[in-house]
Image (cartoon, rainbow, N blue to C red):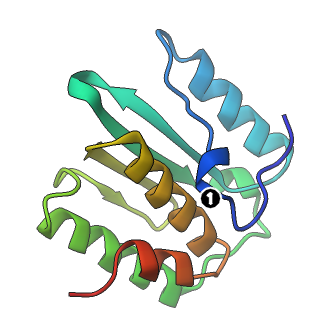
Amino acid sequence: MQPLPVPCPAHLVPDATGTNTDAFHDAYRQAMVHRAVFVAIESEARQQWNVKADTLTAGPDHAVEDTVNDAVRAAITRLIQRHEVNPDAYTGPVYFMMHGVQSEERARELAAALHAALYGDLEPLASAVPPS
């Protein structure tokens, strides 16, 4: 598996859905091997999707600026307020997870935007989750 490009197009975000945890662990291990930010989507019951990201896989040299973390947290808060994701979302600063996304397409869009943001590019996130 090749490392994800930055920014990562939505269609390339790994789907870590599996009957066991193998798909998730494979995607996570690949991110660690390439010292890259982990990002993936996975299907859950009732046709909803999860978005997951983790910056630990990128190694100690990867730093996410406070302004980026603030922007990501604000975007996830807007998604919760708009009932696009469940209120139990993790908003960082290292691990990020959103449950209850209604479609695979939207989950991929959010995952790609989050991935770009964690590399310092906030434009995809602002486009995917515009301010009110």
In depth, the one of 110 and 58 nearer the eye is 110
Measuring 35% from the left and 74% from the top, which residue is drawn there?
129
Residue 63 x %, y %: 68, 75
Residue 115 x %, y %: 59, 62
Measuring 32% from the left and 26% from the top, which residue is drawn there?
44
Residue under numbered circle 1: 55
In depth, the one of 12 and 22 nearer the eye is 12
In depth, the one of 124 and 32 nearer the eye is 124
Disc tally is: 1
Measuring 48% from the left and 58% from the top, which residue is drawn there?
109
Q: Is residue 53 above or below residue 114?
A: above
Give the amino acid at mark 1.
Answer: Thr
Q: Is residue 73 above or below residue 115?
A: below
Q: Is residue 78 above or below residue 96?
A: below
Secondary element under disc 1, as helix, strand or loop, is loop
**Left or right, residue 65 beside residue 119:** left
In depth, the one of 66 and 20 nearer the eye is 20
* Quadrant where the N terminus is found in the figure: top right
**Left or right, residue 71 beside residue 102:** right
Q: Is residue 46 above or below residue 131?
A: above
Residue 32 x %, y %: 77, 43
* Quadrant where the C terminus is found in the figure: bottom left
Measuring 39% from the left and 29% from the top, which residue is drawn there?
43
Residue 100 x %, y %: 24, 43
Based on the displayed image, in which of its 4 quarters is residue 102 positioned?
A: top left
